[in-house]
Image: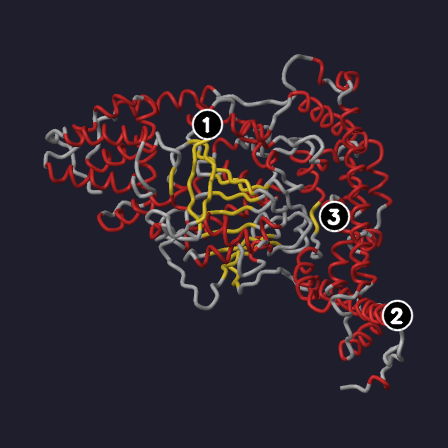
Amino acid sequence: MTDPSQSRFPFASQPAIPAIGQQALEYWIDGWQRTILFWDVLRQRSDQYYAQKAKEVPNVLSFDAELVLDGRTFERPANYLLVRVKPPKGVAIDAKKRPFVVVDPRAGHGPGIGGFKADSELGVAMRAGHPCYFVGFTPEPMPGQTIEDIMRVEAVFLEKVIELHPQADGKPCVIGNCQAGWAVMMLAAIRPELFGPLIIPGSPLSYWAGVEGENPMRYTGGLAGGSWVTALTSDLGGGKFDGAHLVENFENLNPANTLWTKNYDLWKQVDTEGPRFLEFEKWWGGHVSLNAEEMQWIVDQLFVGNRLATAEIVTSDGVRIDLRNIRSPILCFCSKGDNITPPQQALGWIVDLYGKDEDLLACGQTIVYAIHESIGHLGIFVSGGVARKEHQEFSSNIDLMDVLPPGLYEAVMTPKDAAAVNADLVGGDWIVRFEPRSLDDVRAIVQPDPENERRFAAARRVSEINLGLYRTLFQPFVQALASNQAAEWLPRLNPAELPFELFSGRNPLMRQVALLAGQVREQRRPAAPDNPMLQVQAAVSDAIIAALDGYRDLRDHTMEQIFLGLYSSPVLQALVGISASDEPPRRHPGIEPERIAFIERRIAELKARLAEGGLREALIRGLVYIGMAGPGVDERAFEALRRMRAEHGSLTLEEFKRLLREQFFALMLDSEGALAAIPGMLPAETATRSEALDKIRQIVSAAGEVDGERAERLARIAKLFAAGAPIAAGSGKAAT
């Protein structure tokens, strides 16, 4: 131990002084040492940033991975990579389970958030035995790459994953985090055959939706006058858009955290908080670039235009991107605590596309949503608690989601306790149930407002006008004056980038800080926990946070009032053509004649085949009929069915899914006719019919006692199975 009397630090040896003075001195030394250590952590962050930036393919994955495909080598290249994630020690992968593909968002940050921790989307999927792949990207885009190029590259990635897993029981489950959510949804609408279930956590698909007084970010485009600012920024950047601008937008949402809390929490607990801070900043500060064409498309079509949710986007080769074409089940995971993608933006597309519940069923689409009560946007991806609950349950029950009948459901989770019925049928710590919902339930969440639509439609038209004026009058001069040197230096001056430059080891002063920090660690003297100065410190911090929160609330309220006042103006709406007719300002697609004709043909086919099939079809029809009356589909019932399928039959998941949907639609079209046909589908042997009925009873009672309408329906199915008739000539006895 160093002799305090010989210490280089002031006041290391303390004469007898009053207690309050002693505490003040103790706090002063502690605060001074924490400040040195705090600066040193910032230095480490900067050095970490430049080390990451120097890598060709930086990421923050906590798992080892090997490259499978490099999109930069394709005929139409894009800076995207497909890697196979290697499972950690002790984790066994089942080759027959469907692969998981996690696609990370390119929203200013580098890749890896989907596998940031052991308890992550990738981590829980691998622990469930699924092969896992990750789609990331390099910091710099390929010259001229577009959003469509990225879609083509990702389609090839999925084709490769399917090729590598020919024995898998189902197509890949694709997780599109945040901005990647709309990207994979677009691809799934064009290439539905490539996808198994889709999980889109925190993904904004309906950008105009939100609640007045709560979601100010959606006003930003309108208040800036539209996307001309994006074009200007890209021109100044030499044809590239610095992702730090997007990060800055996120940080501006919560100035208290950005300007104070994040750094204060580090300074307050600098002895222990450094590693966690550096781990997160490795991703948060890993900024990437986008091509001007990419960013302009995103802002025009999505942020300001909001065209995806109403099937208004058409590709360069004339293909309309209609989310109703997606054939895979879609799980929308969002949170009430998310101020970047609130539930309204995550779910609004559903009521934008569908006017009636019947329309959703007619399209054969299955949509599940889950709403967390409080977690923030980043917590959806990085929270260990969310990973161990929601993501674990989604992974465990992905096959159940894949075979849900068409319709709208809410995923409801209840804790598994000792009193749970058939607890052995539950894979995790929570019991998952998919409860039927209606479009009215979603409308109650989204709260669509025609007047709000008119305001944002006016903002879209203003954006188009201003962008046209900028491109005609100013862009040629800006592009002529912009230089490579300016494009290189402007990112360094960005508020999101400048701290890295200032606190880097390149700064000679920070090298001295590093030396001083080493001495501080050797002679660290933290203040006692009961030091009253620490209470004063906390009170000052609380006051600063309250002041910054007050500023944020005033700013957001002012922004909202300006937006509402400006774009509610009848004069402005008239000038941009919004009031030129009584038509809705935004197209809400109906069911096109071609789709109606297809549905009619499908209905005729199903009605003609009501009596076709054998024992297998009759069993599934009975299960569906009973299940349609219940409060939802419980994972225990599906697990019981899965075990029976594994023991007694060779029916694949895809075949089961097809059969289940056929029986569902048969019951929807002609319930009485479908039920009346059951006795003729059954074998003559009484024992076989009784065995099948026992299986039905076992499955429907897996979640507990059968009562109410479900009990009545079970009784009706029992009578039909008891009345089984001899098989007609040519009919088969398909095994269960």
Label 2 neighbour load within 10 Å: few <14, some 14-19, many 20+: few
- The residue carrying mark 1 is 360
Q: CA distance from mark 3 to mark 1?
A: 38 Å
Which of the pair 378/455 is nearer the observer?
Answer: 378
Label 1 neighbour load within 10 Å: few <14, some 14-19, many 20+: many
Determine the residue positioned at 61% across, 46% down. Answer: 375
Three-letter residue code for mark 3: Glu
Would you say 361 lies left or right of 660 here?
A: right
Quadrant assignment, res 627 = top left
Q: Along the polypeptide, which appears first: circle 2 or circle 3?
A: 2
Contact, CB < 8 Å: mark 1 with mark 2? no
Q: Measuring from the top left, give residue 396's x and y in whole percent.
A: 42, 50
Determine the residue positioned at 19% across, 28% down. Answer: 720
Contact, CB < 8 Å: mark 3 with mark 1? no
| Residue 724 shows up from this direction | yes
Q: Quadrant of the C terminus?
A: top left
Query: Which of the numbered marks, if any, corresponds to residue 21?
Result: 2
Query: Which of the numbered marks, if any, corresponds to residue 380?
Result: none
Determine the residue positioned at 61% across, 35% down. Answer: 345
- The residue carrying mark 3 is 251
Three-letter residue code for mark 2: Gly
Q: Along the polypeptide, which appears first: circle 3 or circle 1?
A: 3
Mark whose residue sits in front, 2 or 3? 2
Would you say 9 lies left or right of 671 here?
A: right
